Image: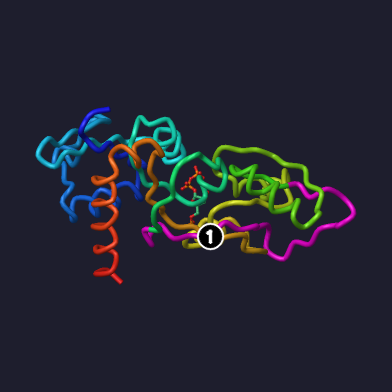
């Protein structure tokens, strides 16, 4: 274990916001803003090392200790249940895990509901809790297409602005759980780099109070 705090960032919209937040509380690493294809950046002065990873992989890097901390959507934590500490809710990246389908559609409760999703664990848990039989269809993206093509009755997916649903003639039927970005830590790192991680957590807390 080195002295750096390694931070796994989710690539994309959420990641840029997360990096700005860390930069604003003293964990900047200016190289990260240069347009290039590098994925790992170290800032000796601030003692941090950043990784860009696929949003759904952040929790894996943190769970296995390749990153000490990371930021991950609650959807990923609920779906994969990684063995990490969830230290705080960052209050952004807000969206909802929902059941959606073609506007006005109704389904025969006598047969298994066909559910397309990127989140099979969340979807099966939700329907099991309601004692509803489902035929689960695991997809990897563009889930909204499935009901439009008649392949599924509903989807279980993230809704942020609702634009993707609207533009494909779908609507929300049920809300399963609210989602937002969470700051997580590797369990061993939390023990052995405790002062540094607690300091980071405290600065994150102060930054969130200011933005409220
Ligand atoms: C997510 C989600 C929806 C969309 C919702 O997809 O799966 O498709 O965003 O956002 P909205 O309510 O603001 O329209 P993502 O962009 O991650 O792409 P994907 O379909 O390839 O997973």
In this rendering, is residue 44 above or below 183?
A: above
Q: Look at 28% across and 51% down and name the residue there.
A: 198
Q: Look at 29% across and 61% down and name the residue there.
A: 205
In which quarter of the view is residue 65 placed?
Answer: top left
In which quarter of the view is residue 89 placed?
Answer: bottom left
- Per the image, is 87 magenta? no
Q: Nearer the viewer, residue 196 or 183?
A: 196
The furthest residue to the right = 110
Q: Is mark 1 on a helix, strand or loop?
A: strand
Q: Look at 62% across and 60% down and name the residue there.
A: 176
- Per the image, is 105 magenta? yes
Q: Nearer the viewer, residue 101 or 89?
A: 89
Q: Which of 95 and 48 is in front in this view?
A: 48
Report the side of 180 relative to 194 (left or right): right
Report the side of 203 relative to 186 (left or right): left
Instruction: Give the residues in magenta.
Output: 90-114
Residue 149 in the image: state x and y as whole percent.
69, 45
Q: Which residue was labeled with disc 1?
A: 96
Residue 43 in the image: state x and y as whole percent.
14, 36
Tell me how the rendering is colored: rainbow
Quarter of the image where the N terminus is located: top left
């Amino acid at each position: 274990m080195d002295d750096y705090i390694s931070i796994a960032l989710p690539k994309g919209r959420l990641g840029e916001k997360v990096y700005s937040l860390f930069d604003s509380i003293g964990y900047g690493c200016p190289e990260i803003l240069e347009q290039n294809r590098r994925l790992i950046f170290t800032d000796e002065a601030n003692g941090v090392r950043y990784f860009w990873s696929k949003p759904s992989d952040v929790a894996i890097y943190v769970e296995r200790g390749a990153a000490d901390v990371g930021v991950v959507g609650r959807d990923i934590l609920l779906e994969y249940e990684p063995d990490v500490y969830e230290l705080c809710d960052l209050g952004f990246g807000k969206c909802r895990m929902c059941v959606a389908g073609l506007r006005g559609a109704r389904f025969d409760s006598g047969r298994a509901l066909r559910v397309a999703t990127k989140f099979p664990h969340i979807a099966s848990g939700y329907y099991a809790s309601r004692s509803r039989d489902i035929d689960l269809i695991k997809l990897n993206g563009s889930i909204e297409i499935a009901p439009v093509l008649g392949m599924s009755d509903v989807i279980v997916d993230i809704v942020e602005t609702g634009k993707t649903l609207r533009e494909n003639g779908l609507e929300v039927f049920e809300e399963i759980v609210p989602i937002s970005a969470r700051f997580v830590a590797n369990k061993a790192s939390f023990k052995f780099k405790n002062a540094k991680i607690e300091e980071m957590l405290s600065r994150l807390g102060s930054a969130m109070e200011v933005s409220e």
